[in-house]
Image (cartoon, coloured by chain):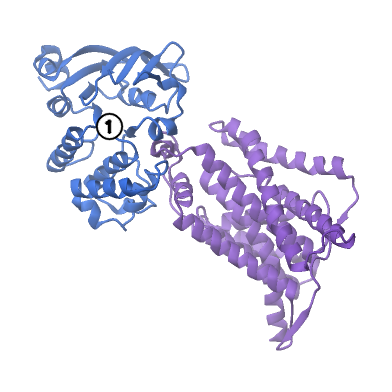
Amino acid sequence: MTFFLQQVVNALQWGSFYALIALGYSMVYSVLMLFNFAHGDIFMVGAYMGFFVATGLVTLGAAGVLALPSWLILALTILMAMFLTSLVGMLVERVGYRPLRGAPRASAALTGLMIGIILQTGNLALLGARRQTFPGLIDVTSYKVAGVIVSNKALIIITLSILLTLALHQFVRRTKWGMAMRAMAYDFAVVPLMGVSINTIALLTFGLGSALAAVAGIFFGMAYPVLEPYMGLLVGWKAFVAAILGGRGSVLGAGLAGFLLGFIEIFVAAVFPSTLRDVIAYSIILVILTFRPYGFFGEPYSAQLRL
Amino acid sequence: MLLSVEDLRVSYGGIKALHGIGFRVDEGEIVCIIGANGAGKSTTLRAVSRLVPAEPGSKLTYRGKDLLKYPPDRVVAELGITHVPEGRRLFDNLTVMENLRLACFARRNGPEIQRDLDRVFSIFPRLRERIHQKAGTLSGGEQQMLAIGRAFMSGRQVMLLDEPSMGLAPLLMMDVFKALGEINREGTTILLVEQNARLALRFARRGYVLENGNLVLEGSSEELLNNPDVKKAYLGG
């Protein structure tokens, strides 16, 4: 039982990364009918943005210029990395995708792959092949509850990931911006007739998704403090799986599917040799997708793509 | 003159849909364009609302402004020209209220929005009963009411209506046109395209006849209703 609960904690933390990245994947897929294959690399950019901000603040503190409490450094790191990464995401939309609006879907998908390559190799060119170490932002304390070890770090990661998922869900449900996003998910072509600029909503969608990917990047850096330019590849693909599994148009679906992926991977690894983890985990997901091809909470949308 | 269109040409991937048509709409008027399926009626409205690009040389002027300089969302938000598209195209996944609210996206929040909402509900009382229902669950007539209500909320200087009678039972159709008449009397100019020529000409003051991308006739509704060619081609003899 203790073993099981311990795995649950691990799975929640592991699933947090997938969930946060899947939200952005899912939003772009739903609102713009686009697979943004660069999104895993946006996660990488977010991790580096967090690394720069955090390292800068820690260095300032060590030099005695600006000594901030560690919780404030963490908060500032998250907020500033969210902001900077959302700018990168919006730039990707503006430069990469907007000129191809109305172009064949395959071209837009290729754009994502190319932007991903540019982000990876650009990082490599700028920073070199040396791996960066994410600074330890908070003093790690571990609590033992009923034999289960939970660190304050894991608690922060899990709680904030769940809260951000719920916050995004509320944003999409309740605000007029979210309403416009849902309208676009249903019938893209008619949205301009409501006086809503498609370009604005596209920027918003990319900005929000990228900001959440940045949080995932920082959390990842806190949990596994080694950063490298290709860190977004596999994680990105898996988050993409979660986005599709969650169902088009469903924020909660994408979040839940992200956590589900975490659970499947962690529990498979707990029973089978870890080299077989992804083989077994993704075979299971393949079977799930066979039975639920529209994902868990896929919403219907208009088949008419043009007016 | 409120809206003037000169030499409007539109093609879809090399196939010409409009061959240089011209028409005008005055403030407060109801004008209709009638024609057969595929004549280019919907394309005409799409060109005015800027959903499809007009070819170089086309001139579209609204209140002295060059319409071709505006993207479609600003045609609605800044000029108040709204387009009720063919087949209504509601957001079925949003509630009735959300559909109406979304149409106010670009408007400043204020008492005017509430006043306009109340007006929509007084014109179409059945929408009020259904505000929390998803638009996809409405009947055909209610959907047309919501589509018109949405246009009312978003601009309402000019309404471009694409086949508002489509798929409606005769009684409902009369209701919808009665409501449109009411909206027009309050100051909204209406440009209507219809396959149901008799209905359109009874409702409008003036009309144009569109055939294969060319305007072939124009005149007052009375003239057109009595024109032998129109009678033969569009009014069933």
Q: Residue furthest bottom?
A: A146
Q: Nearer the viewer, residue A305 or A176?
A: A176
Residue A267 seen anywhere in this rendered image of the structure: no
- Which of the 4 image quarters holds residue B77? top left
Q: Residue furthest front?
A: A65
Is B129 drawn above or below residue A191 in the view shown? below
- Which of the 4 image quarters holds residue A5? bottom right
Task: Tell me the quadrant of the picture where the N terminus of chain A can be found.
Answer: bottom right
In percent of the image, x 38 and y 47: which residue is there?
Answer: B91
Is A250 drawn above or below residue A205 in the view shown? below
Looking at the rendered structure, the kind of residue marked 1 is Leu
Is B165 drawn above or below residue B130 in the view shown? above
Residue A28 seen anywhere in this rendered image of the structure: yes
In percent of the image, x 13 and y 20: which residue is there?
Answer: B221
**Chain of the residue where label 1 is placed in the rendered structure:** B
In percent of the image, x 22 and y 32: which residue is there?
Answer: B187
Residue A115 percent location from the top left of the image? 71, 39
Residue A14 percent location from the top left of the image? 71, 67
Q: Nearer the viewer, residue A254 or B49?
A: B49
Task: Tell me the quadrant of the picture where the C terminus of chain A can be found.
Answer: top left
Q: Exactly how many numbered labels are in the figure?
A: 1
The hue of chain A in the figure is purple
Q: Is residue A249 left or right of residue B193?
A: right
Q: Nearer the viewer, residue A159 or A277?
A: A159
In percent of the image, x 24 and y 20: which residue is there?
Answer: B26
Which residue is label 1 attached to?
A: B161
The hue of chain B in the figure is blue
Disc 1 crowd rating (10 Å Cα; few below 14, some 14-19, many 20+) is: many
Q: Is residue B204 left or right of residue A222?
A: left
Q: Secondary structure at mark 1?
A: strand
Residue A123 percent location from the top left of the image? 82, 44
